[in-house]
């Protein structure tokens, strides 16, 4: 089976560091990578709506000099005719050198990876994993704060269904000197298995609160999340919890001058548009960092480096 | 209460009281056309109360299923009325096509011929998670 990336723990800490180093090198010397993936094809199979992730993968491949084959929406693909994920992966492997796949079913990327004969990158499988978002988050923190350890990280909003939050906690739990502050309504707290695996087992300190303003002044990172309609079975629960936390310039007055405000996007209303002007708003930098990390990941999985040489 | 001893078959003993029915169902014993006896709430020196299942035929049983439901159970293989083999039971690392994932968002609910695979995620709490979506197993 070829190497695929389904979740962040598929990467060793050394590989994560190497990916971030490559991403920073791409940022510093983009021309050196402009032909790195010449004659290579990325297939983007998106069976669930997504704008930014698909465009980010496609932009990443184009900036590496490669080409893109794209499928968007299950309704226009063989999946609508009842084709299995495994068969789709086998078929697409005949056309492309690497696959980025988003699918509404949890575990779909793993099924695809087991059948594909080319690397598969999980671009989101339902509420389960979204590793390249976490890669974007890690690079953003490293670039903004200069380190990934010795930080107080606040996570705010939907911490129950928010896959990016679980993944970020898991990924960051590998670094020293961290403290997590988990801010959510009672109904949307981090599931206990995530706390047990990533925090309690590693003796990483954390606190839980329902009040953002009580803790905002102690944070180095504030990671806001959207309460996602698609993760609820019940519309009433969604509407009740949607507006739990809205970050405004007023609230930011109590925060540190060097706070880094992050959000996986898209936002609905949980960060006021007025916050965008604040230098502490880093969520659009995250988007850009996501593209660089996807470039680095594509290079790693294809065994390529700057100039198109084999790694 | 007396249940005749068996000549050739399997005795699953030392099942914690209340677990025999779960085992009966998960082992698919209800689909067999051989005599099966399930004795519940038997007085036991070791357990206080225990359940026993006797299968009057030498058929293959999935030891992993027994380990999942009750790792303290013992499996005795009987041949010609004698104890021929005693099998050690442990919590299995993997369960294949024993449980069904109950997460409606899991790929295993719709992917053709995909095995239902669960992996042991916490030995102390005897917790299993779906290999595909990582949802916790529920009996």
Image (cartoon, grey):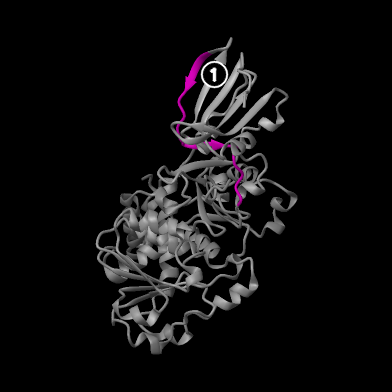
Q: What stretch is highlighted in magenta?
A: B83-102
What's the residue at 60%, 23% (across, down)? B60
The residue beneath circle 1 is B77
Q: Residue at x 69, y 23 (%)?
A: B35
Residue A44 lies, in percent from the top left, at 57, 55
**Looking at the picture, does residue A294 appear above or below residue B115?**
below
Does residue A34 appear in the picture of this structure? no
Please indicate, yes or no, whether residue A169 appears anywhere in the rendered image. Answer: yes
Secondary structure of the residue carrying numbered label 1: strand
Marked residue chain, label 1: B
Asked whether, in this view, residue A38 is left or right of residue A71, the answer is left
Quadrant location of the C terminus of chain A in the rendered image: top left
The one nearer the camera, A243 or A224, is A243
Q: Nearer the viewer, residue A268 or A187?
A: A187
Above or below: residue B82 compared with residue A241: above
Q: Position of residue A13 (x, y in %)?
A: 32, 51
């Amino acid at each position: 089976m070829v190497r695929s990336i389904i979740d962040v723990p598929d990467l060793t800490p050394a590989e994560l560091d190497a990916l971030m180093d490559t991403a920073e090198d791409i940022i510093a010397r983009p021309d050196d990578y402009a032909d790195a993936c010449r004659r290579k094809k990325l297939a983007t199979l998106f069976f669930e709506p997504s704008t930014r992730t698909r465009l980010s993968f496609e932009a990443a491949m184009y900036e590496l000099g490669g080409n893109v084959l794209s499928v968007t929406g299950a309704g226009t693909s063989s999946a609508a005719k009842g084709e299995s994920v495994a068969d789709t992966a086998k078929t697409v492997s005949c056309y492309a050198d690497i696959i980025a796949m988003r699918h509404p079913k949890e575990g779909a990327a793993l099924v695809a990876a087991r059948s594909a004969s080319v690397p598969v990158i999980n671009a989101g499988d339902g509420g389960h994993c979204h590793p390249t978002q976490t890669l974007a988050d890690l690079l953003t923190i490293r670039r903004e704060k200069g380190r990934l350890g010795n930080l107080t990280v606040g996570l705010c909003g939907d911490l129950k269904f928010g896959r990016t939050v679980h993944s970020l906690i898991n990924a960051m739990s590998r670094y020293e000197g961290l403290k997590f502050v988990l801010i959510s309504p009672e109904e949307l707290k981090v599931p206990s298995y995530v706390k047990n695996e990533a925090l309690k087992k590693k003796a990483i300190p954390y606190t839980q609160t329902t009040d953002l303003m009580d803790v905002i002044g102690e944070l180095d990172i504030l990671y806001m999340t959207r309460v996602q309609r698609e993760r609820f079975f019940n519309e009433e629960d969604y509407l009740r919890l949607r507006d739990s936390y809205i970050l405004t310039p007023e609230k930011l007055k109590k925060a540190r001058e060097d706070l880094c405000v992050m959000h996986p996007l898209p936002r609905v209303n949980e960060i006021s548009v007025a916050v965008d002007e604040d230098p502490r708003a880093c969520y659009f930098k995250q988007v850009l960092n996501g593209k660089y990390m996807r470039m680095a990941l594509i290079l790693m999985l294809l065994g390529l480096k700057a100039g198109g040489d084999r790694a | 209460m007396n249940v005749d001893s068996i000549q050739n078959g399997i005795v699953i003993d030392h099942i914690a009281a209340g677990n025999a029915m779960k085992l009966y169902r998960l082992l698919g014993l209800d689909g067999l056309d051989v005599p099966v006896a399930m004795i519940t709430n038997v007085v036991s020196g070791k357990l206080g109360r225990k359940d026993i299942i006797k299968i009057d035929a030498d058929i293959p049983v999935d030891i992993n299923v027994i380990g999942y439901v009750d790792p303290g159970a013992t499996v005795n293989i009987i041949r010609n009325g004698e104890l021929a083999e005693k099998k050690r039971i442990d919590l299995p690392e993997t369960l294949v096509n024993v449980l069904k994932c109950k997460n409606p968002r899991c790929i295993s609910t719709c992917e053709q011929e995909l095995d239902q695979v669960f992996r042991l995620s916490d030995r102390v709490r005897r917790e299993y998670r779906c290999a595909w979506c990582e949802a916790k197993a529920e009996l």
